[in-house]
């Protein structure tokens, strides 16, 4: 009989957002009249920018003619897109990235999850706690961890606690670690790392020959000057960091799917025979073997955000969600609830009132005021006692949700 990958059995029954979806569906079935407002999964609600739509329509037309039709494209992405990304997100910020250091994909969730495949199984992994579940779950699946312990931690993983007591900024690990996942602006806490904090991590990685896996999917939401938009703004980071970026939250591509990963050729790991190998080469091998490129139409849409109109429209889109973030944060504070994030990120991380558990607060919010959020405990043990609301709803629902919390929720 075929055997299974037993590592999957170590995981919690279902992926966090699948579990939330299941609970909400059950509630809706029992309460069909309930007017549910969803501020749980960080999915966008506003249409794609007009510049993207126009470019995608044009691309569809191109595919209708033999002369302009395209089949397989370069797995790493068309140069019209990679050149625009490099120019706008890196060169303009004084960072030099070569065209063979960028890999366009179907989104950063896939890349953040798949990247661990090019690392040895004996690498020691460090993750912040709470954390976007993909980093941890994919390492569990690969067999880089032991089993789940009673305290909610996986054996063999170095957890870096982040809560109000350290201002949600992880401290350097006491033991040596090889792979370090950092997400900035952070999902789920909505908080950021300053330039000085990030430098500490780059210095640690250089001293310890570790690699930082830097998820910058929410970079477009940064408003404060002292928060780097890219880890490569930190000196020396190009030797030790891989960066993930996404069009999902920047321009509404959650359903359309487009992201990219930067792997400088200077980031290296050691092979079993002791030679140093570029991670870039390994990822290129993986990408070309397992992926056939992001759809041409989607890449044309993504490239359109770098036109002057596209830039203006993306700015307005991000501004729209950040206004929601302000409304939620201020509304929570007015209701006497302590809230974090929402200044450089579209997530608001609140302290559950009266020491309530995250899942109890989830149930209370759902049943009493019909609002769906995400329990902090779903992101790791240190998320217990916290709760996440997303600013990606539409304005009307965001205002209605805040009003319900202020006027109808009883503590
Ligand atoms: C979230 O809600 O944390 C995000 O939508 C998840 C994701 O981007 O995959």
Image (cartoon, rainbow, N blue to C red):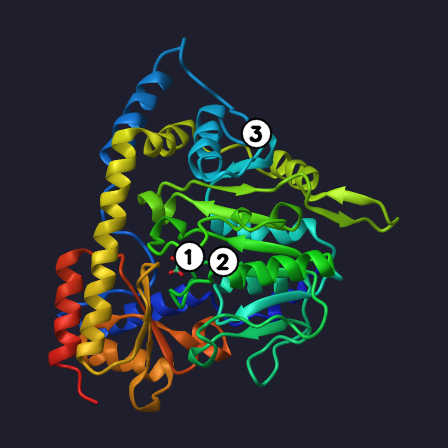
Of the pair 159 and 359, the residue shown nearer to us: 159
Disc 3 is placed on an element classified as: helix
How far across and how far down the image is residue 110, in percent? 51, 49
Specify the quadrant that holds the C terminus: bottom left
Disc 2 is placed on an element classified as: helix
Gap between marks 3 and 2, in whole Å? 26 Å
Horizontal arrangement in the rendering, residue 72 relative to residue 185 (left or right) = right
Horizontal arrangement in the rendering, residue 4 relative to residue 341 (left or right) = right
Gap between marks 1 and 2, in whole Å? 6 Å
- Does the CB distance between marks 1 and 2 fall below 8 Å? yes
How far across and how far down the image is residue 76, in percent? 55, 32
Of the pair 193 and 380, the residue shown nearer to us: 193
Residue at 80% from the left image edge and 45% from the top image edge: 276
Q: To which quarter of the image does residue 393 belong?
A: bottom left
- Does the CB distance between marks 3 and 2 fall below 8 Å? no
At label 2, counting other C-alpha atoms closer than 10 Å, the crowd grade (few under 14, some 14-19, many 20 or more) is: some
How far across and how far down the image is residue 149, in percent? 61, 82
Of the pair 177 and 19, the residue shown nearer to us: 177
Q: Is residue 122 above or below residue 26?
A: above
Q: Is the residue indicated by label 1 positioned so its CB lies within 8 Å of ligand 1?
A: no
Residue at 49% from the left image edge and 26% from the top image edge: 78
Q: Which residue corresponds to mark 1? A: 226
Q: Which residue corresponds to mark 3? A: 99
Q: Which residue corresponds to mark 2? A: 195
Q: Earlier in the sequence, mark 3 or mark 1?
A: 3
């Amino acid at each position: 009989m075929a055997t299974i990958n037993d590592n999957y059995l170590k995981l919690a029954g279902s992926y966090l957002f699948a579990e939330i979806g299941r609970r909400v569906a059950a509630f809706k079935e029992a309460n069909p009249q309930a007017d549910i407002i969803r501020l749980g999964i960080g999915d966008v609600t506003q249409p794609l920018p007009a510049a993207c739509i126009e470019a995608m329509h044009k691309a569809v037309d191109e595919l209708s003619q033999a002369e302009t039709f395209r089949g397989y494209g370069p797995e790493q992405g068309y140069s019209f897109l990679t050149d625009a990304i490099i120019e706008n997100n890196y060169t303009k910020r004084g960072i030099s990235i070569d065209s063979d250091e960028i890999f366009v994909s179907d989104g950063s969730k896939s890349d953040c999850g798949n990247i661990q495949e090019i690392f040895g199984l004996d690498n020691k992994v460090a993750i912040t706690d709470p954390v976007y579940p993909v980093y941890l779950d994919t390492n569990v699946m690969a067999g880089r961890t032991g089993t789940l312990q009673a305290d909610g931690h996986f054996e063999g993983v170095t957890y870096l606690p982040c809560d109000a007591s350290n201002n949600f900024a992880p401290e350097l690990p006491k033991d040596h670690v090889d792979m370090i996942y950092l997400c900035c602006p952070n999902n789920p806490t909505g908080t950021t790392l300053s330039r000085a904090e990030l430098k500490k991590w780059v210095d640690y990685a250089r001293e310890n020959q570790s690699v930082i896996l830097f998820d910058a999917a929410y970079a477009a939401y940064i408003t404060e000057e002292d928060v780097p938009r890219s880890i490569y703004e930190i000196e020396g980071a190009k030797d030790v960091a891989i960066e993930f970026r996404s069009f999902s939250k920047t321009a509404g591509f959650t359903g359309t799917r487009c992201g990219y990963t930067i792997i400088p050729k200077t980031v290296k790991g050691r092979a079993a025979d002791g030679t140093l190998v570029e991670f870039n080469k390994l990822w290129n091998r993986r990408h070309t073997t397992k992926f056939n490129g992001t759809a041409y139409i989607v890449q044309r849409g993504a490239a359109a955000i770098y036109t002057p109109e596209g830039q203006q429209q993306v700015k307005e889109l991000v501004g729209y969600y950040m206004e929601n973030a302000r409304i939620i944060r201020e509304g929570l504070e007015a209701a006497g609830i302590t809230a974090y994030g929402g200044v450089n990120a579209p997530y608001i991380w609140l302290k559950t009132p009266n020491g309530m558990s995250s899942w109890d607060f989830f149930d209370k919010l759902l049943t009493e005021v019909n609002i769906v959020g995400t329990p902090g405990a779903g992101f790791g043990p240190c998320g217990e006692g916290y709760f996440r609301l997303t600013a990606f709803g539409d304005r009307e629902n965001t205002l209605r949700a805040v009003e319900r919390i202020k006027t109808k929720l009883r503590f």
